[in-house]
Amino acid sequence: MRCYCPRFPVPVLNFFGFNLAAYGQLEIGGTSIGPQYLYVMLGMLLVNIVFLTLSYQRLKITTFDPEFATSLGMRSTWINTAFMFLVSVTVTAGFNAAGAILVIALVITPPATAYLLSKNLPTMIALTVVIAVVGALAGFWFAYVLNAATSAAISVFYGVLFVLALAIERFIKLRRRRLVRPEARSVATAKRHDEYTATVQAGA
């Protein structure tokens, strides 16, 4: 949906009744082109993508195997410092755009949920992005339907996704254990049988 706000000469996006005109607008030549923090966060997204694309291999090695990185002659100090600086700037920008509760939920819950579903790093990163986007959209919709706080609704939905992922992971592990136990028992029984047969033959 699009609606026209009398304060701004351009149509303002209205998503499920959520009017972006409520945010501080960025104006160029007297014309509003949208919320200021929309462009701030888009800029932070672009910076993060560029940094991770250029530093992915070095960051992976220095983070998960610093001794191996040192043996290759990589200096982990500067890249770790740059990474933490970028995280702090992104979080600070997020605090102003979305609030502390939602930023903390975004930093912790999607990657933790992805870690439960996969141990492969590229897959984890892709799952983290998907979970973050789906959780934000679904949580926003529930907040609109229930007339609840947006940040709280999105955070709770992230928590629900985490609990579901944890339940799925536990179920898969339990099923694997049940499948392995009969095989282990049969192997142990066959081993005891062989030992018994060898003992009888030795006594004979």
Image: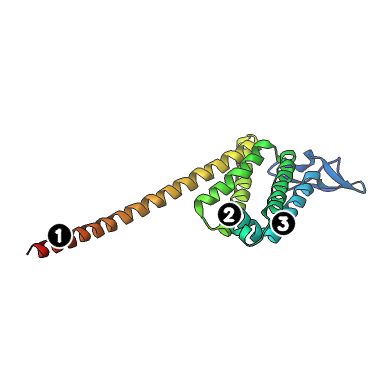
Q: Quadrant of residue 139?
A: top right
Q: Mark 1 highlights which residue?
A: 196
- The Cα atoms of the two marked residues, 3 and 1, are separated by 64 Å
User: Is the Cβ of the residue at disc 2 closer than 8 Å to that at disc 3?
Assistant: no
**Disc 1: CA contacts within 10 A as few (<14), some (14-19) or many (>=20):** few
Q: Mark 2 highlights which residue?
A: 64
- The Cα atoms of the two marked residues, 1 and 2, are separated by 48 Å
Relative to 115, is 75 on the left or the right?
A: right
Q: Looking at the image, which is closer to me, 197 or 21? A: 197
Helix, strand or loop status at disc 2: helix
Q: Mark 3 highlights which residue?
A: 51
Q: Quadrant of residue 56?
A: bottom right
Residue at far right of view: 29
**Disc 2: CA contacts within 10 A as few (<14), some (14-19) or many (>=20):** few
Q: Which amino acid does the dot numbered 3 rest on?
A: Phe
Helix, strand or loop status at disc 1: helix
